[in-house]
Amino acid sequence: MDPATQSQKAEHICKLAPIVPVLIVERVEHARPLAEALVAGGLPALEVTLRTEAALDVIAEMAKVEGGFVGAGTLLTPDDVKRAVDAGAEFGVSPGSSDTLLQACEDEGLALLPGAASATEAMHLLERGYFVQKFFPAEAAGGAPFLKSLASPLPQISFCPTGGVSTKNATDYLSLPNVICAGGSWVAPKDMVQSGDWAGIEKLAKDAASLPR
Ligand code: 3PG
């Protein structure tokens, strides 16, 4: 899949809701109810980070949830890409980008949201055809003011800021013309996942889904 087509698919997924939950799931039995709660709350695009042993099984379980679009986050290597696709991931997210990672996603036909944290990184990705990118780590790399500064010189790029985004600052990002959605882990707090507070998570998802953009 060529990068522009990948970006079109990523754009479609990013437009589904203002927030993409970033999920670190330790136990596969949490996958279905967690995805169901987030989708019911209005957040259909879900990023499952490949940071736990269960992550690939979690992706496979979440992929069965109606109305959801499950992606694999923290993609670092071609092997990660292959395993994510085999598990049923519909899109991928990476904290940055390398040529080998981009090539693997293009070869596997996995729509990728590649990470950039500077004008130069964003330009390299744009040159290859990626016009939808993750801005990571958003708060540490300069936050909403930084992203706002890129809107005029690089209006072709839409960003999904992730990393330090919360209810406190989400609207600062979402109100920018070059922000398509934002990513964050606050909609699925560890303690609520572990205690199985799916109603509480659905409520957090509802609040996030109603953020203006
Ligand atoms: C991450 O990589 O963990 C994401 O950027 C999520 O960051 P957050 O926990 O600050 O939302």
Image (cartoon, rainbow, N blue to C red):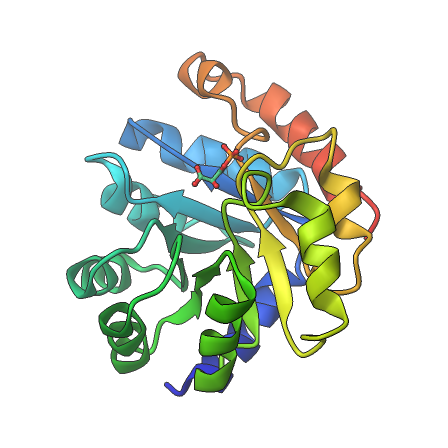
Q: Nearer the viewer, residue 45 or 144?
A: 144
Q: Nearer the viewer, residue 33 or 19?
A: 19
Residue 56 drawn above or below residue 29:
below
Residue under the point 68% across and 56% down: 147
Residue 14 drawn above or below residue 120:
above
Residue 4, visible in the rendered structure: yes
Q: Quadrant of residue 180?
A: bottom right
In the figure, is residue 44 to the left or right of 120?
right
Residue 17, visible in the rendered structure: no
Residue 62 drawn above or below residue 122:
above
Q: Position of residue 205 (x, y in %)?
A: 66, 34
Residue under the point 59% across and 31% down: 187
Q: Position of residue 69 (x, y in %)?
A: 49, 57
Q: Quadrant of residue 16?
A: bottom right
Instruction: Check the image and name the residue furthest to the left.
Output: 79
Residue under the point 51% across and 22% down: 189
Q: Position of residue 113 (x, y in %)?
A: 47, 64
In the figure, is residue 181 to the left or right of 138?
right
